[in-house]
Image (spheres, rainbow, N blue to C red):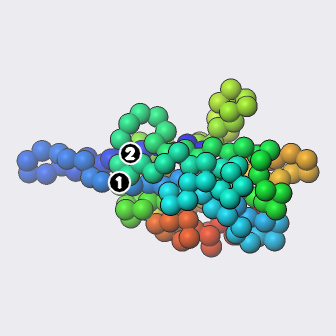
Amino acid sequence: MGLGWDAVKKRGLFGSRAQAVDLDASALLFDAAGALVDQVWFQQLRSADGALQHTGDNVTGAGEGDDESIVVDLARLDPRVATIAFVVSSFTGQDFTQVENAYCRLVDAAAGDAELARYELAASGPHTAQVMALVRRDGTGWSMTAVGAAGSGRTFRDLVPAVVPHL
């Protein structure tokens, strides 16, 4: 999962300045009964089984390309995990109408970094979070479902109630 954004420029009497915007990528790991068994986010950069790795917290959106990423090795995933939910939240509380060039995307590295899903978040609405996609065990393999549901909250904890109906 990749997440990118730019700080919003605020115009004022003496020119413009960048406003601090901190978006966060998180992955929530659920068992078949819908219970949260693990999570990866800016305060826990690695899943307990080591299958998911967050690349680190970018609190400004500075830089090119993905500002935050979560890398997943499905073969190493704990067998109890039935679903991975990928979510984005605004830690600083701006809604997505106040963020520039924001997007989140799901990429398959095994398929030459093919983009499986992409959401343009900037100006997408007056919500502070989004449930992006679900990756589910499907027999012997995995399937991906794009969700794109609006949510509210600053961290993954706030988003669990928004994810559960999609499980």
Q: Nearer the viewer, residue 88 or 82?
A: 82
Percent x, y of residue 154: 46, 66
Rounded to the nearest angstrom, the CA distance separating label 2 from label 1 is 7 Å
- Is disc 2 in contact with disc 1, using a CB cutoff of under 8 Å? yes
The answer to which quarter of the image holds residue 2 is top right
What amino acid is found at the position of numbered circle 1 in the picture?
Answer: Val
What amino acid is found at the position of numbered circle 2 in the picture?
Answer: Gly
Residue 85 shows up from this direction: no
Q: Nearer the viewer, residue 133 or 72?
A: 72
Query: Residue lying furthest right in this view?
Result: 139
As helix, strand or loop, the secondary structure at mark 1 comes to: loop
Which quarter of the rendered picture does the N terminus lie within?
Answer: top right
Q: How many marks?
A: 2
Query: Residue drawn 82% across and 62% down?
Result: 80
Q: Nearer the viewer, residue 63 or 144?
A: 63
Q: Nearer the viewer, residue 53 or 32?
A: 53
Q: Residues within 10 Å of mark 1 (few under 14, many from 20)?
A: many
Q: Is residue 2 above or below residue 167?
A: above
In the picture of the structure, the residue carrying the numbered disc 1 is 21
Query: Residue lying furthest left in this view?
Result: 14
In the picture of the structure, the residue carrying the numbered disc 2 is 61
Locate residue 76 relative to residue 129 in the image: left or right: right
Percent x, y of residue 156: 55, 65
Query: Residue drawn 55% across and 59% down?
Result: 44
As helix, strand or loop, the secondary structure at mark 2 comes to: loop
Locate residue 84 relative to residue 139 in the image: left or right: left
